Amino acid sequence: MNILKTAPIRIEAGAWIGANATILPGVTVGTGAIVGAGAVVTKNVAPHTLVGGNPAKFIKAVAQA
């Protein structure tokens, strides 16, 4: 028996999501964060950070405007 788990995805103000990125249920992408193209986001993304890869990992901090 397969169980499908659902939860809302929260994308906060000023966040950018690259093309073909996958964000799993229950994940929050913080304010001003950037998710690289093709990334698979399995955990929350901290505000003002750049993440990428599979699974998505911290790459660098992003300067606040």
Image (cartoon, rainbow, N blue to C red):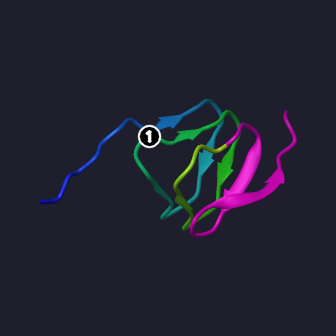
**35 or 5, which lies in front?**
5
Which residues are drawn in magenta?
Answer: 46-65
Quadrant location of the N terminus? bottom left
- Label 1 environment density (alpha carbons within 10 Å; few <14, some 14–19, many ≥20): some
The image position of residue 19, as x and y in percent, is 52, 62
| Residue that appears at 69% across and 57% down | 51
According to the picture, the residue beneath numbered tag 1 turns out to be: 26
**55 or 48, which lies in front?**
55
| Residue that appears at 20% across and 52% down | 3
As helix, strand or loop, the secondary structure at mark 1 comes to loop
Residue, far left: 1
- Asked whether, in this view, residue 34 is left or right of residue 39, the answer is right
The image position of residue 43, as x and y in percent, is 56, 49
Residue, far top: 13
Q: Residue 49 magenta-drawn?
A: yes
Task: Specify the amino acid type for callout 1.
Answer: Gly
State which quadrant residue 64 falls in. top right
34 lies above or below 15 = below
43 lies above or below 28 = below
State which quadrant residue 45 falls in. top right
The image position of residue 15, as x and y in percent, is 63, 40
| Residue that appears at 30% across and 42% down | 6
Quadrant location of the C terminus? top right
